[in-house]
Image (cartoon, rainbow, N blue to C red):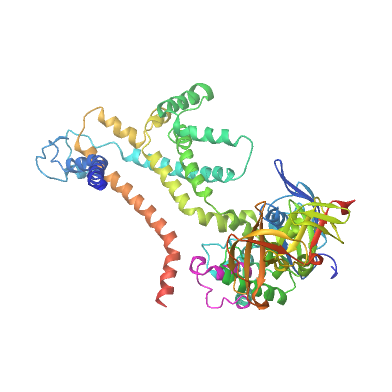
Amino acid sequence: MNQSEPVFRLENVTRRYGDLTALDSINFEAPRNEYLSLLGPSGSGKTCLLRIIAGFEKPDEGKVYFQGKDITSLPAHERGIGFVFQNFALFPHLSVFENIAFGFRNGTMNVDASEIDKRVGEAVEMVGLAGLEDRNPEQISGGQKQRVALARTLVMQPKLVLLDEPLGALDANLRGRMQTELRMIREQLDVTFLHVTGSETEALAMGDTVSVLDSGKIIQTGAPDEIYNDPSSSDVALFLNRFNLFEGKLEKGSFAGPFGEVAVKKVQPNDRDMYAIRYDRTKAYKKGQTVPGPALPAKFLASEYLGSSIIFLFETVDRKQVEIDHHLSFGDPDEYKVGEEYVLSWDPAQALVFGKEATQ
Amino acid sequence: MESKVLKPVLAVYVAAFILFLYGPFFVLAILSFQQGPEGGPQFPIIEWSTYWYRHLFGFTPPSRIAPLPVGEALVRSLTLAFMTMVTATVLGVMAAQAFRRRFKGKGLVFYLIVLGMMVPGVLTGLGTSLLANNVIGIERHWWSTAFVAHVVYTFPFAFLVMLAILNRFDNSVEEASWALGVSPVRTFRKVTFPLIFPGVLSAMLFAFTLSFDEFPRTLFASGRDQTLPLAIYGTFSVEIHPNIFAFGVMTTLFSFALLSVYGILMALSVRRAKKTAMQEDIV
């Protein structure tokens, strides 16, 4: 297998549950030795996608390739693909050590006892669990469980590990630490991680490449900054949770929205006309002040202090919430009065416009 | 306020419950120490003695009261209960395992299985006997026709116990095992079975006890050689002596012993984890 060949590839994979199409003719692949994150809102089919790659479910149509071979009809235990569950799925009746040694002891690989001790020992060391080998899963913390689940999978030296919302069951503090750790552990090994998550920050932080899944289709794949700065559709912008999105009408290079008409230069193809401006590029002005671009009247609702920044929530006349993210390194925020009317505005050059027009 | 009324009512209820649960046994136990061989199965106790226990094991001088003909019946019943227990539990585990997946006619099959415990026992027994004698044309025995009748009766209980256990079972531990390259068969042995073992024990206990004192189905289905409940009932038709009570005490003690074994096995499978936890705390 050469270096450029993808480690796995999905070809027109479709999966239906009754009338519901969970995966709609997906083509998807990942290069060797990479951290790939897959962002999808709940119900987008992301877990289904992982389960099909792992072999827990069969696709209704299409093929799955792993290391160049068609594995569509191969049962899960013959695939050699690792899987880390959101709930960790440790074997509750076995010690930490035996959890990690489980694949060696019960798989088809013939590994002798001293080799098992050595390899499990190394795995324990790598994930920082030394000293906890004899504990039972119920006696260790969530973060430690996560590490056992990881060690148990990595000790088998798979070329691909699927992680199903692996940080979802951890508290925020630990999640941050595990993010760094997951990346570091992966970099020591020649393995591809496919990390599925519903959290946009996690997806952007973790992935060398990020793919966005929506309604059973991959709608964008790219580097994290590419996805963040240049979402290919209004849906991607919506999932990133960093954009105020406005509906409106695009005609002859001008977008008519709740903020009036704005001239636009670049339009990206979309199934409907949408206007997007990032939270941190939206600003509020007092009535009567000169604004840099479109003017959107809105009432101040509330603020949320996040430490490094403050989120201000406004509500427009048609009851749509608009968010402003003010980073505190740019100076103290203005004071707003709850219930008072302000005018929101932004630099129109920084807005993204999506339109049906561009599709033609 | 409310507890002023509720508490006494509940207390009376609990007392009545305990009285009716253990009362009969206590009466039998007391009467089993009646003097023999003249003492009858009623109060007052003429004189306390262990005569009827000795009579049971044949340690008393011959008298007009024949020894209780239950020795062979007891062995038969134990063997039958054991056979039934193993078969019904294996079938119950397998059927419940099958019910984890979707298949055509799942609902219908469920009701067909559960029907086994709903159908009146006398009818099942009679039906089994007619089926064996008149339709298939085989002789009735406790180890053939009665065994089948017992399995049909106890299997739904084992099945329901296992269904409840497997309902709460987390499928992802099995999938995790597969993903580590372990075959489904070995996964069942190494992961699924150890985790559902407490349920298997309960299913076994159900099947054993239900079979051990099964009466109506066995009455018609067992043929010439009688099981223990039949043999005991047979002695009632002649004359009741306190040796029956002595025997009742013995079998009840045996049942308690069985329950204790069950309890110990259960506690062991739960405590193994806890024990290591305590060691950790001490260190």
Q: Is A218 placed left or right of A343 in the picture?
A: right
Q: Is residue B153 magenta?
A: no
Q: Which residue is situated farthest in the front direction here?
A: A288
Residue A96 screen position, x and y as percent:
55, 69
Q: Quadrant of the N terminus of chain A?
A: bottom right
Q: Is residue A130 magenta?
A: yes
Looking at the rendering, the stretch of residues picked out in magenta corresponds to A125-150
Task: Determine the residue positioned at 19% across, 41% down.
Answer: B32
Task: State whether residue A73 is above or below residue A110.
Answer: above
Q: Is B195 placed left or right of A299 in the picture?
A: left
Task: State whether residue B9 is above or below residue A106.
Answer: above
Residue A208 screen position, x and y as percent:
76, 70
| Foreground pick, B126 / A338 | A338
Q: Which residue is situated farthest in the right direction here?
A: A360
Q: Which residue is situated farthest in the top direction here?
A: B134
| Foreground pick, A104 / B226 | A104
> Is residue B153 among the parts visible in the rendering?
yes
Q: How many marks?
A: 0
User: Residue B141's image quarter?
Assistant: top left
Q: Is B66 placed left or right of B149 in the picture?
A: left
| Foreground pick, A63 / A224 | A224
Task: Determine the residue positioned at 17% across, 33% down.
Answer: B64
> Is residue A80 among the parts visible in the rendering?
no
Residue A178 screen position, x and y as percent:
62, 72
User: Residue B206's image quarter?
Assistant: top left
Task: Determine the residue positioned at 45% across, 65% down.
Answer: B273
User: Residue A228's image quarter?
Assistant: bottom right
| Foreground pick, B30 / A47 | A47
Residue B106 screen position, x and y as percent:
59, 37
